[in-house]
Image: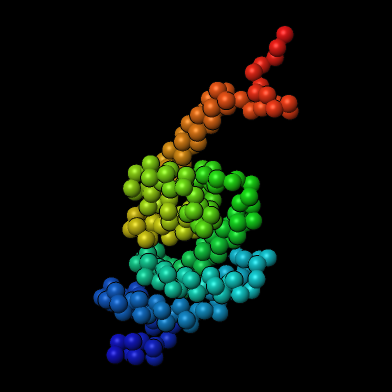
């Protein structure tokens, strides 16, 4: 019954529902869904602008994915008291998701550079989910991180969310998300340094053969 009443409201009236403290969470989500549909062409245009060089249908994919997976968190993180309209807030969400999508596409094209992809965790860029999630070494590194850091790393690196979206999902501040990313990256860098040191030790004990097939044991005088 509530949905039928909301469907007859104008965009301004629907935004009023979102800004009304007395509105229930369910009513706000219904209003947001109707606004999302109403603003659909504008949001697709925002995504397309952020995805220059990509196929046109990928802009639609970005908006559809955001609508399907993040509507509840978007409604929860929207704060009318900041003076931002819901349309402008949606523009920002779509732009951020499109940028994350573009970064993932670039990473997929470049992923052959780093066969283990563990080094991707030391950058500020999200990685390719289907690549990182298949790496046993990545899983071992994640297990070494504190649970709260794991939660942030999985969403940011493996699921391609940006810091604001991670903060909204975990109900924490964006600055807290950045602190966890920083601490986690330091842990991963330390792990990489330990691996490099161990690898150097192994090579020293078991030198690779030279062109004649004999181990390199040093120069014979």
The reply to whether residue 99 is in sight is no
Looking at the image, residue 207 lies above or below residue 83: above
Q: Quadrant of residue 75?
A: bottom left
Residue 162, image x and y in percent? 47, 57
Q: How is the image coloured?
A: rainbow
Looking at the image, residue 205 lies above or below residue 37: above
Looking at the image, residue 137 lies above or below residue 162: above
Residue 134, image x and y in percent? 49, 53
Residue 70, image x and y in percent? 42, 68
**Image quarter hosting the C terminus:** top right
Residue 85, image x and y in percent? 44, 71
- Residue sitting at x 37%, y 66%: 73
- Residue sitting at x 39%, y 56%: 167
Q: Residue furthest front?
A: 213
Tally of numbered tags: 0
The reply to whether residue 127 is in sight is yes
Q: Residue furthest top?
A: 221
């Amino acid at each position: 019954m509530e949905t039928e009443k909301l469907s007859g409201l104008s965009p301004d009236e629907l935004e009023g529902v979102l800004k009304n403290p007395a509105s229930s969470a369910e009513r706000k989500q219904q209003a947001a869904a109707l606004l999302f549909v109403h603003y659909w062409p504008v949001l697709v245009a925002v995504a397309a602008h952020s995805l220059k060089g990509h196929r046109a249908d990928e802009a639609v994919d970005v908006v559809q994915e955001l609508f399907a997976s993040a509507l509840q968190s978007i409604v929860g993180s929207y704060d009318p008291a900041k003076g931002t309209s819901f349309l402008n807030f949606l523009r920002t969400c779509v732009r951020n998701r499109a940028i994350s999508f573009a970064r993932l596409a670039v990473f997929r094209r470049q992923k052959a550079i780093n066969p283990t992809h563990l080094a991707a965790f030391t950058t500020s860029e999200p990685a390719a989910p289907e690549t990182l999630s298949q790496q046993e070494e990545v899983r071992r590194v994640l297990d070494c991180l504190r649970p709260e850091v794991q939660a942030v790393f999985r969403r940011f690196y493996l699921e391609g969310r940006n810091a604001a979206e991670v903060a909204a999902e975990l109900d924490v501040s964006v600055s807290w998300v950045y602190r966890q990313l920083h601490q986690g990256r330091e842990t991963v860098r330390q792990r990489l340094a330990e691996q490099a040191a161990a690898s150097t030790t192994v090579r020293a004990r078991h030198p690779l053969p030279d062109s004649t097939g004999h181990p390199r044991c040093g120069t014979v005088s």
